[in-house]
Image: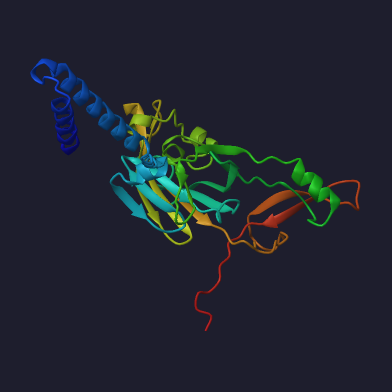
Amino acid sequence: MSINRKATACLFALMLGSGVGVAGNRFVYRAVKDTITQRIDTTKQNVQKGKAPEKEKEKPSAYEQLVKKKGSVQQGLFTVRHIDDQWYFEVPDSIIGRYLLAVTRFTAVPQNFGKFAGEAVNQQTVYFEQRDDKTMLLRAYVLSQEADPKSSISRTLKASTADPIVASFKVIGRNKDTKAQLIDVTPLFVKDNAVLSVSSDNSKQLKLGGLMSDRTFIDTMKVYPINVEIATTRTYSSAPSAVPASYTGAMTIGLNTSVVLLPKVPMRKRVWDNRIGYFTNRYTIFSDDQTKTDREQFISRFRLEPKDKK
């Protein structure tokens, strides 16, 4: 406004000094005013153009968006999150490739079922494998052939062996602090599979039909330093049999799956001896020094050591 007033005063003084009539030359005043206003607007535009653009805010990652939602968190072997009826594991890089023993037992069964709570229904050794940045796999460790690790044939045997993939997970994201990868494990425990639910042999023996997904649930997950305990309720279709519950067309059972981290250094193998009553596993043994394979039996046992050695 001060620029407009000064310019107008100068123009009037010039016109009066030169004898030009002011009243008859209003267009001159308007022209000068418009010119000055235009210059001011141009100056403002130039100033605005010179401003540094504001930095765009980084969008939260898929991991950050998920963990912001309300839910429970448990720390242990895995960080377990329960959000919107879905269950998630945060898998540390240190666990990838480590062997985990998964043992599934009955916790509740129908009457006259032929099995009782506490009986084992499945057992398998599994391990996580990183396929790429977006995919993590769960493989079952199946061993029936062995060779001396130092032998040439051992490398050939290992290269030609592929463990079955029992599950695949999409990596949602990483925890910025722990670098652990977040995966959704809900389908692993609510869908039927031959590793973490009723084995195929038991399903046939117990005459269980297809799994009813609308009547199957994850009840709880409890986390400890070296294990995770998963309790599930499963309902299967059934045809009439000796089990009274089968006449309803469905049989519901309770299961508990224990996932335990195994030691990095396994126990020493012990060859079976018929004088000792152990269950055994049979293996085919390969060697560089022989043209044929040998069959060997090793006992199945758990590492039972006294906690207090005093």
Asked if residue 62 is positioned above or below residue 102 in the image, the reply reads: above
Question: Viewer-proximal residue, 289 or 76?
Answer: 76
Front residue of this view, candidates 36 and 70: 36
Q: Position of residue 227 (x, y in %)?
A: 47, 57
- Residue 122's place in the image compared with 49, above or below, is below
40 sits to left or right of 30: right
Residue 38, horizontal then vertical, whole percent: 26, 26
**Residue 278 in sight from this viewpoint:** yes
Image quarter for residue 76?
bottom left
Q: Quadrant of residue 224?
A: bottom left
Q: Residue at x 91, y 46 (%)?
A: 291
Colouring method of the image: rainbow
Residue 38 located left or right of residue 218: left
Q: Residue furthest bottom?
A: 310
Residue 117 visible to the viewer = no
Q: Nearer the viewer, residue 65 or 28?
A: 28
Q: How many marks?
A: 0
- For the residue pair 134 and 190, the one nearer the viewer reads as 134
In the image, residue 20 sits, relative to residue 106, either above or below, namely above
Residue 117: image location, x then y, percent? 40, 49
> Which image quarter is the N terminus in?
top left
Residue 78, how many percent across, how many down?
A: 45, 54
State the residue at coordinates (38%, 43%): 87
